[in-house]
Amino acid sequence: MSQKFIINGGRPIEGAIKVKGAKNAALKVFPLALMTSEPIGISNMPEIEDCYRAEEMLVALGHEVSRSGKGVVEISYKSRTCVNLPPGLVNKFRASIMFVGPLLATCGEVCFPHPGGCVIGAGTRPIDMFLDGFVKMGAKVEVLENSYRLSAKKLKGATIFFPKITVTGTESLMTTACLAEGITILKNCAMEPEIPALAEFLNTMGAKIAGAGTPVIKIEGVKKLRGGNYMLIPDRIETGTFAILAAVANSGEVLIENCNPGHLEALWALFDKIGVNYKLGQNSVKISPTKKILPSNVVTHEYPGFATDLQSPYTVLMTQAHGLSLIHETIHDRRLLFTDMLTQMGANIIMADPHRVVVSGPSKLYARKLISPDLRAGIALVIAALIAEGSTEIDNIYQIERGYEDLVERLTGLGADIKKV
Ligand code: EPU
């Protein structure tokens, strides 16, 4: 039987909450262990399901993963046991594709099924830009019945243009190119903060990457990479999610600590527009109650634009704004479907098309029995439940715990009435 959250809404939300290390940075660092025979240490690691799956993947491939404390992971090489990524793990998280390039670069071949993760794309989320990139670098790609087989005697540097901006695609090809022969130039790259952070760590391992965090990245291949220690950057999506929760609850002062407010400029610009009171510190943000939340349209955009991963909490916020807002989701195809559950809770939302909804607020929300469809929709339902009247039950919380550590404890610390059963 799956676990559920039971949330009694309407409690004042106030106090302090600490942000954990970035999930989407953590998942990209584990596979680097495949590219060196020296140990890798990672700190500020979030204790979340997706990271446990990434650890299991390394163990399945012959590495040893140990912990010397909460959030501190050490990975060492024992022996390479196989070049097949275990389907049961690949199915569980999209970032499993990050293991493909390092195996291809070091073993000359890799087999894997189509990666899983949140069901937010049209059908399964495509991997064409990864495959095209590997082909440009000299790999042969075979599409088999239930898997892909990639092989290459030697990967070679190449110039690769991404027809669409892709975060993990940029990270995957940038990482793989470190062990390819010669120079790789990646164009139209994603610029999310996790990318320069990853490049910086790879450079400490001996890689030669320039331009990460800009649209053009140049990588000069090296023969070997060393180990090293990496401290993950704070999770900007957690930061934004908690800031939006504080704004929606609008019931007390909330201090969000251990974060990097500089990674969320698009959110602060929106807060200016809709009248949320916030104060940025160097590593913290304080949200204070406001008289009235105003509506504002939003269009999700690649970094530094408004993050798609914050669209669902923002949609909940707009159910409490005085007026109409248009939410336009441009990155993932199915990310607005969860708004149906907000409507069931009493929100006034009209879907114009699969990429656009119009929210008319403010609406009183009421408790319902809900099922979390994916990670970010799930956390939005948690936020909605925290301001709803009555006791909301949210099922399928594995999807939420994939990305948020100790949610019950941390939200309880802010005064929320939330239990896991
Ligand atoms: N795309 C293709 N072909 C590809 C790769 C991507 O068409 O080969 C499309 C996708 O379908 C999507 C668009 O390109 O429409 C952008 O997707 P991107 O590749 O940038 O997404 P991702 O790297 O798979 C990461 C985060 C997501 C976040 C997006 C956008 C990780 C593990 N995931 O996904 O985070 O929404 O970037 O910022 O880094 C989450 O944390 O809940 C989450 C889904």
Image (cartoon, rainbow, N blue to C red):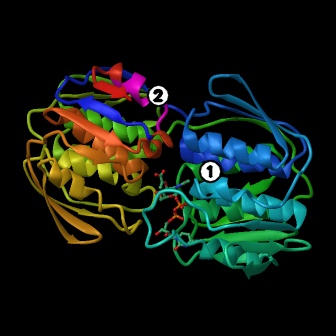
Q: x%, y% of residue 414?
A: 31, 21
- Mark 2 CB within 8 Å of ligand 1: no
Residue type of the residue flagged with mark 2: Asp
Q: x%, y% of residue 96?
A: 65, 56
Q: Residue at x 70, y 41 (%)?
A: 55
Q: Are marks 1 and 2 in contact (CB under 8 Å)?
A: no
Decide which of 307, 374 is in the foreground and name it.
374
Which residues are the magenta region? Answer: 404-411
Disc 1 residue crowd, few under 14, some 14–19, many 20+, Cα 10 Å: some
Quadrant of the drawing holding the C terminus: top left
The answer to whether residue 221 of the structure is visible from this angle is no
Q: x%, y% of residue 190?
A: 55, 62
Q: Residue at x 23, y 47 (%)?
A: 316
Number of the label disc, if any, that sits on residue 406: 2
Residue position marked by numbered label 1 in the rendering? 196
Quadrant of the drawing holding the N terminus: top left
